[in-house]
Structures are given as C-alpha cells and as structure tokens.
Image (tube, rainbow, N blue to C red):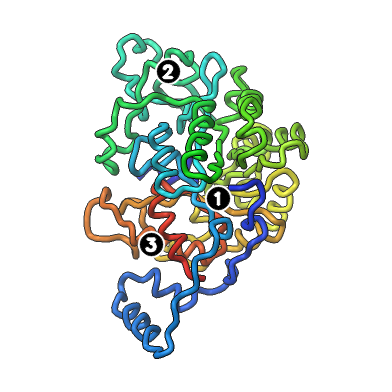
Amino acid sequence: MSCAGDTVAPPVTHALQTRRLPLHPYSPFSFRRFLRLSLALPFVAGCALTLAGCDDDEQDPPPPPPIEQKALVVGHRGASALRPEHTLAAYRKAVEDGADIIEPDLVSTKDGVLVARHENEISGTTNVSQVAKFADRKVTKTIDGVPLTGWFTEDFTLAELKELRARERIPVIRPGNTQYDDQFEIPTLAEVIALAKQLSAEIGRTVPIYPETKHPTYFQSIGLALEAPLVATLKADSYTASQATVYIQSFETQNLKDLRQQLGTSQPNWKLVQLMEEETRRPYDFTVKGDTRTYADLMTEAGMKEIATYANGVGPNKRSIINVDAEGKFLPPSSLVRNAHAVNLTVHPYTFRPENAFMPAPLKVTGPDSTRNEEGLIAELHAYLDAGIDGFFTDDPAVGRRAVDTYNP
C-alpha cells in the first residue's frame, strides 16, 4: 500500500461487518481519551487509575471478546517493522506476532506473473542496482503522472526477478532490518497464498490475505493488466477460491467496479476495498478520465453511498479519520467512519507504525526517529478504536495485537 507516511494503509463472515463501537466517530473526545493521548500529564492518568482501583468490591475484568469481535490486525506488507517488507519471512513473522491478515501489494513481471512489491520500481527494496547484468535495465518512466528513474518489475521476467534479493526500504528508520538484506527472494502471489495456507494449518485458524492492485491503469496501458491474473491465481487454489476471506484493494476505482461487475456475487469470500489517499488527491483513473473529484468527495455521505455499490469497505489514510493540528495534537474525529458505517462499509485505515518518526508529536518519546515507541503506538491505536474503526494496517502486528487485546471501550 502507498501512503504519505512512507516518505519521513478470519472466516468469510465476521462480526466486524455489523459491529459498531459504543463511541461514535464524531463524538467529542472524552476525558478518558485525553488521558490516553496526553503523555504530558502521566500523573493525572496515574491518579485516575488509582481512584478506579479503590473499590473494595473490585471484581476481575471480563474476559476479552472472541477474536472475531475485535478489530482486525492487518500485517502491512507483513511485519515490515521487523523484516524487509513483502517477503515470506515478513508475512510469517506477522502471523506469528498475531496478525489476523497478511497484505501483499501486487505488481506484474514482464511475463505476466503477479509478485509482491510495494512498487514496480524496485531499486529501494532489492539489490538490483548492484547486479551488473541488469545495469542496462535502468530507465526513466512516468508512473501515474510522476517521472521515476530506476528498475521496474515489468522489464524483468519472473526468472530474472528471482535472481534478485530483498532489502530494507527505510534502513535509517529500521536499521535492525538490514541484517536480513539479501536473504529473501521476491515472492509471487501464488507463493503468498501457499504460505497463508501453510500458516493456517500450523496455527489452527484461517489466515486471510489482503492483496492490493498497484497502479492498475498504468499496467493496463502496457498490456499487463493485473485483474485477470489476480482472479485466475486466486481461483487456482481452493484456499483463496472458497475457504479464506480475500480483501482486494485499490486506490483507483474503475478496476474495483470492473471486478464487481465481473464477479457479481459469485465469490462471497472476496471483499473489495476502496483505498483512499489524502483528501486533496484523486484516484489516478479519475485524472485520466478528467473527473475532478478528489478523495475528499469519496469520503462524504454521497461518496460512501457510491462506493457501497461496488465495494465492501474503505481503507483511508488514518489522518482522514483523526487529523492533527499544527502542533501534532489530535483533533476530534471526522465523519468518515460514520459515513462509511451508515452504508455498511467496513473501515480499515493505514498505516500504524511503531517508530518515533511516525508518531504524532504528543506521543513521541526522547530519541531518534528510529526509536521504537510501542506505548505510543498503542495509545494512538486506542484513539482510533474509540473512533469506531473495524481494523487497521500496521507494520508491527505484535504491537497492534496488544493494542486490540488491551482495548477497553
């Protein structure tokens, strides 16, 4: 999944599709929320906890709800805070750490095979720039209106991509991940499905997958449309054809509409999710068609009603739900969750990361950008759970799992 933060997003039917948290997304922050978010007043939080524990008749807290009643933890590109993203090792680590779902971003090879990479330009996530035999593959292309120079998956066959090895994308923020550089291959979608099936057998629960079609208009324009091989690959394995839930996501709209028309109700275990970037931006297929609407238009009541005609959920940038002011402090939640839930769309925002670099100012701790800040991430996630989200994308599923399991509405 693409998102602004990159620069320094179970069973077939589950309760999340109808569940609503008690606090509405447009309610003002309660005092309890303030205590969670304000690290500047830890002594107040301590006093509140002390007072809460003074009841002589204190009883044990109720057991946590079954997992299907909790917000879904999506392993964003795997456990990408702990392993190089979009590798089988990252996906395995995500599930081992408590992710409900694993998320592969999909791009195409020259020979039409879908592989898991954050982008089709792979100089930042592989060792391709150091492989002499591929030096002449470096080119400049325009992807979704933006010129990029590097090496692109669509210029390599699958066999050639398998010669490359994955590397940490943001080594300054995640220096610990560099110890795994050059150890892992670029996986295919089929290999991700096989891993999900294997993990499901190992842990005794179904592990869904959450594939994203990257730059669908671009890939269509070069004769390597993603949708047909995606459907074929998902249907080729009984695990994704009928057993596991599959969430298909896109920042564009037309390919999701086309998929809905093609599939109809034939794949009840496949859910379509409309991703949303910042409000001022627009889906690239809108740009191509001259549609001047932005993602902000899709977040309105009318926009959500339109999305509900072809999708089952939305995946917004987290700041579209709870933004921050000039000092980095949380503002009251927007109407996005309310608008989505009004038409039975689930809401899975992105991306929640454990490093200091990605924390809003009130939740930062002393230290460099690479400092892990697990308590800050838990506090942030609790605020979004208060706002009514149904799940979330996180680079650290272990911390995400802790946040969900310790959340008390």
In percent of width and height, residue 64 lies at 50, 66
First-in-chain label (2 vs 1)? 2
Picture residue at 64% right of the left edge, 49% below the top: 313
Amino acid of disc 1: Pro
**Which residue in the structure is indicated by mark 1?**
316
Q: Are marks 2 and 1 in contact (CB under 8 Å)?
A: no
Q: Is residue 279 left or right of residue 53?
A: right
Viewer-side residue, 376 vs 151: 376
How far apart, in angstroms, are the residues tagged by discs 2 and 3?
41 Å
Name, please, the residue furthest toward the left: 367
Mark 3 crowdedness (10 Å alpha carbons): few <14, some 14-19, many ≥20 = few
In percent of width and height, residue 238 lies at 64, 31
- Image position of 365 with respect to 23: above or below: above
Q: Is residue 145 visible?
A: no
Please, what secondary structure does the residue beneath circle 2 have? helix
Picture residue at 36% right of the left edge, 64% below the top: 327
Amino acid of disc 2: Leu
Q: Quadrant of residue 56?
A: bottom left
First-in-chain label (2 vs 3)? 2
**Which residue in the structure is indicated by mark 3?**
328
Q: Is residue 336 visible?
A: yes
Image depth: mark 2 or mark 1 in front: 2
**Which residue in the structure is indicated by mark 2?**
161
Image depth: mark 3 or mark 1 in front: 1
Mark 2 crowdedness (10 Å alpha carbons): few <14, some 14-19, many ≥20 = many
- Image position of 223 with respect to 393: above or below: above
Please, what secondary structure does the residue beneath circle 3 have? loop
